[in-house]
Amino acid sequence: MALPSLHPVDVVLASTRFYSSLPVVGKHLEPFAGLTAMALWSGHYAPAAVRSAISRRTGGAAAAPSDDPAAIVETAADVAAQIRPSRIPPFVRASAQKRRSLYRSSVRYGDHPSQLLDVWRLPELPPGPAPVLLFVPGGAWVQGTRMLQGHTMLHHLVKQGWVCLTMDYRVSPVHRWPRHIADVNAAIAWARANIDRFGGDREFVAVAGCSAGGHLAALAGLTPGDPAFRGELVEHADTSVDAVVGIYGRYDWQDRSTAARRNFQGFLERVVVRRSQAQHPEIYRAASPMARIHRDAPPFLLIHGDQDAIIPVNEARAFRDALAAVSRNAVQYREIPRAGHAFDLVDTSHARRCAVETARFLTDVRQRHLQARPVAV
């Protein structure tokens, strides 16, 4: 195994992999391995995140317009017409939203104990098979749990008659890349083969994700059928998706042009991939949505906060520009003023705006998909 030179961090990470592999108790200790890895790297981002949070809090109520002319930014009046004000943060509302929308919990989409998903839907669906959205949670590829994340968006879509899935997946440092994307593909294939049991339309499956989940959703959308990302799936399993929503995602796994980017690549090398980028550049290129763009990419919606201190907004803009220049399908971009990373967990107005925009985009793609289907004779 080719790794960077041995460092005390490597020893700590090796110990987390050891105790997570212990019989009986190991599976319960896996989350602590991910938290340890996250803690080792979070210090680099903490000062910028704190400065960004202070700036948003002291900047007044008015949102500064985006400096990106291609960004679609709604006015305050537009937002007020769609979103009821609330001071309760989304993570506090998450459990109530789950109680109202959860239909079936801990459904297995694979044989590994971590391959579980929840099905969200109305008790009684509208006539006809319902469109399907698979949500991939974030967590820096070291946490991948269906708790809390995406609940505002999922609840909003459920009220509109969608069947939504939110998943767990295997994460680092216990599981090495590409296990993460293989699990996402396994969940997509499960939905294509089984979602009709829950009233969903197997012919329309979209995928969305936040942060690391945004990376995984984008990569899955751009690489259907890639044998390197199939894991245990049988050869004929369908891993294609009909639309992708990336929410403050990381779309470039190759760039080392700045100190922040080099730090991120070091995190990937030591924690997620556990191989040197210099010696194995093909791994990082294959895992980078920016490098996998092609003409037949599915319709994309990208949502990002303009004050994201973890994944700067310029990275989302660059991915949008590159994708829009090549794809024959729609590429839409929404930039949320005064929003930082994980805005959908801490700010109700931002979370609801994200939900409204996502539902609007997916509903439009769904309608176009239905119009393009051959008429049954």
Image: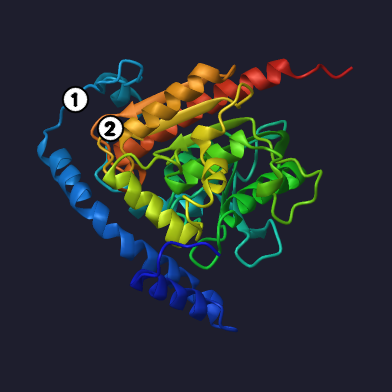
Above/below status of 231 relative to 56: below
The kind of secondary structure element at disc 2 is: loop
Q: Position of residue 68 (x, y in %)?
A: 29, 20
Residue drawn 54% across the image and 79% down it = 26
Residue drawn 80% across the image and 46% down it = 235
Residue drawn 51% across the image and 57% down it = 273
The kind of secondary structure element at disc 1 is: loop
Q: Which amino acid does label 1 sit on?
A: Ala
Give the image quarter of residue 223.
top right
Residue at the disc numbered 2: 306
- Along the line of sight, the residue nearer the viewer: 104 or 73: 73
Residue drawn 63% across the image and 60% down it = 115
Q: Is residue 162 visible?
A: no
Q: Distance between the residues labelled 1 and 2?
A: 10 Å
Q: Can residue 11 be seen in this view?
A: yes
Say whether marks 1 and 2 touch (CB < 8 Å). Answer: yes
* Lower sequence index among marks 1 and 2: 1
Residue at the disc numbered 1: 64
